[in-house]
Image (tube, rainbow, N blue to C red):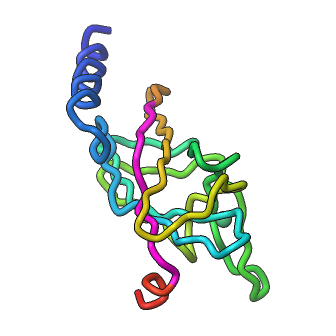
Amino acid sequence: MFSKLKPVVFVAGLLLLSAQVYAGEVDVKDAWARATAPGQVNGSVGVVITSKKDARLIAVKSAVAESAEIHTMSMDNGVMQMRQLDYLELPAKQPVTLGPGGNHLMLFGLKHPLKAGTTLPLTLTVQYADKRTEDIKIKAQIRSLTAVQQH
Ligand SMILES: [Cu+2]
């Protein structure tokens, strides 16, 4: 039991020290979302997540969206299909890249348009093998449509 307590204290300390990017055992970087077009109420978010331990991304939410889901994208008879995932595996020490065309975070019911140059608050919930969960708060950079297309 005692050996399990120490990492928890360690994580709590890191959470206090690090404002956003590095929370405990999960490193989250390059979070971004495409600026929305007028009238567009859904958006998708890309991010690179690296967990020190085997973990799963089990939930995502944002204060500016009514709901958010983890999505996967695949070709089905020549048509791109998006499907919700209950969770996404984060194998230890392997960067997992989410973004357009593959797994991504999907926002529904945006409360305001996503404007280039601003940021979008997100909370990622990660669960470790021991069932402990951790909320990681990040900010995604909003990029303009043209900047993304040039990429
Ligand atoms: Cu999607």
Point out the residue furthest to the top here. 2
Look at the magenta stretch and give its main secondary structure. Answer: strand
Residue 39: x %, y % from top left: 73, 70
Q: Image height check: is 22 above or below 81? A: above
Q: Position of residue 46 (x, y in %)?
A: 48, 65
Does 110 appear above or below 1? below
User: Where, quadrant-wise, is the N terminus in this rendering?
Assistant: top left
In the rendered image, residue 76, in percent from the top left (x then y), is placed at 76, 80
Instruction: Please provide percent x and percent y for residue 25.
Output: 30, 38
Q: Quadrant of residue 17?
A: top left
**Residue 139 against residue 81 in the figure, above or below:** above
Residue drawn at (76%, 84%), measured in percent from left and top?
79
Please say if 34 is above or below 141: below
Quadrant in the rendering for residue 54: top left
**Ligand 1 shown in quarter:** bottom right
Pick the residue in front: 27 or 64: 64
140 in the magenta segment? yes
Which residues are drawn in magenta?
134-145
25 horizontally vs 59: left or right: left
Residue shown at 29% from the left, 13% from the top: 5
Q: For the view shown, which residue lies furthest in the right direction?
A: 77
Q: Quadrant of the C terminus?
A: bottom left
Task: Tell whether position 17 is magenta.
Answer: no
Q: Nearer the viewer, residue 1 or 19?
A: 19
| Residue at image location 60% in from the left, 71% down from the top | 36
